[in-house]
Each structure stands twice: as structure tokens, then as C-alpha cells.
């Protein structure tokens, strides 16, 4: 089996078009490199955009979703490889356990929570996956500033900024995926 990468991203569709364009480009890059995409399984927002593009390009995609989300039909109907789990905690664990790397695209509290938990677990030595933060148009600048402040104020170690990698866009990400 090829490399598998999980993408954390937004389910909101009410966002700027630039985020959709970036998500589509990342999906193209994943398929071009025969990387299996793992995602939250949703049909809307950047999640739906990524799934649509991977499916359109005949790539491989795996959805991971809690049962309660399937019950309210949030699952992407074009994705046939699904893992339904008990709750959000099991979902995040499955994301990490099923992947060789993690990519965070812009998103809301769910995306932020997934990203920060992944960084925390890596810091605790519970996984060693590369974590890539795609900082589209400076979206993550405030978070990056806060993460740096946690290091400056000694809440984290000086070299903890090596737990994640900031990339500006899909083209910068290519360097790390090859």
C-alpha cells in the first residue's frame, strides 16, 4: 500500500474561494503522487471539495466519521471506503493511526482542535508523524504566533517548533511529500 496522509480541514462552505482552490490543488498533488487521502468524511466545505477532486481524478480516499454524523447524513456519498467510529475521540485516534503524515488546511474549531491535539500527542511521544500546517494567505499566522509565544514563555521547549512544519501553499507542500 502507498503512503497515506490525513487532511484536517473545514466543513464550512461559506468561506473564500481561495481556500477551495488550495484544497483542490492539494487533492491533485495527492492523487498525482498516488498518496491515499484520509479525511473526515464530510460532503461539504473543504472536506467535500477534497473528496470530490480525489474521486474525479480516480484517487484513493478514506473517510473516518463518528456514527452520529452518519446518522444525520453528513457523510460524502461518493466515498466508498469509510470507517465509522464511536465518537470524535475515536475519529482523531483513527486519523493518526491510519496515516503516515498529517496536513492541516484552514478550518474552524474542529480543525484547530485536531491540529493542536496532534501536536500535543507528538510532543508527548505518542506518535511521530510529520505535521504540515498549510498557511494559505496567512490564515494560520495568529496560531503560529501563539505557538511561538508558548515557546518564548517557556510553556514548551525551545525546539518544540520542530514538531510541525509551516508551508505557505500546496506548491511548498510538494517538497515534503516527495
Image (cartoon, rainbow, N blue to C red):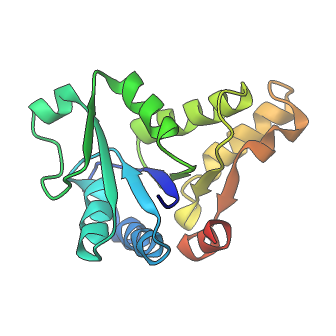
115 in relation to 155, above or below: below
Total of numbered circles in the picture? 0
Between 141 and 41, which is closer to the camera in this rendering? 41
39 in relation to 64, above or below: below
Residue lying at the far front of the rendered structure? 1
Q: Considering the image in quadrants, where does the C terminus appear?
A: bottom right
Where is residue 97 shown, x and y percent of the image?
A: 50, 36
Q: Which residue is drawn at 31% across and 22% down?
A: 87
Q: Residue at x 73, y 30 (%)?
A: 123
Where is residue 72 shown, x and y percent of the image?
A: 10, 33
Q: Which residue is drawn at 86% across and 31% down?
A: 157
Residue lying at the far right of the rendered structure? 158
Hey, which quadrant is residue 166 in on the image?
A: bottom right
8 in relation to 50, above or below: above
Hey, which quadrant is residue 84 in on the image?
A: top left
Q: Is residue 172 visible?
A: yes
Q: Is residue 14 visible?
A: no
Where is residue 48 shown, x and y percent of the image?
A: 25, 57
| Left or right position of 31 against 177 | left
Where is residue 70 shown, x and y percent of the image?
A: 15, 35
Between 135 and 95, which is closer to the camera in this rendering? 95
| Left or right position of 31 against 150 | left
Q: Residue at x 35, y 26 (%)?
A: 88
Amino acid at each position: 500500500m502507498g503512503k497515506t496522509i490525513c487532511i484536517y480541514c473545514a466543513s464550512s462552505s461559506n468561506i473564500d474561494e481561495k481556500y477551495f482552490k488550495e484544497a483542490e490543488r492539494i487533492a491533485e498533488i495527492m492523487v498525482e503522487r498516488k498518496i491515499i487521502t484520509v479525511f473526515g468524511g464530510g460532503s461539504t466545505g473543504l472536506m467535500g471539495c477534497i473528496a470530490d477532486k480525489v474521486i474525479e481524478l480516480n484517487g484513493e480516499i478514506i473517510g473516518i466519521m463518528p456514527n452520529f454524523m452518519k446518522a444525520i447524513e453528513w457523510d460524502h456519498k461518493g466515498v466508498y471506503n469509510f470507517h465509522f467510529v464511536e465518537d470524535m475521540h475515536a475519529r482523531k485516534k483513527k486519523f493518526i493511526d491510519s496515516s503516515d503524515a498529517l496536513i492541516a488546511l484552514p478550518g474552524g474549531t474542529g480543525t484547530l482542535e485536531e491540529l493542536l491535539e496532534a501536536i500535543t500527542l507528538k510532543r508527548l511521544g505518542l506518535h511521530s508523524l510529520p505535521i504540515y500546517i498549510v498557511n494559505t494567505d496567512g490564515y494560520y499566522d495568529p496560531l503560529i504566533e501563539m505557538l511561538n509565544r508558548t515557546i518564548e514563555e517557556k510553556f514548551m521547549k525551545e525546539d518544540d517548533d520542530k514538531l510541525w512544519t509551516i508551508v505557505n501553499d500546496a506548491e511548498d507542500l510538494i517538497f515534503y511529500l516527495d
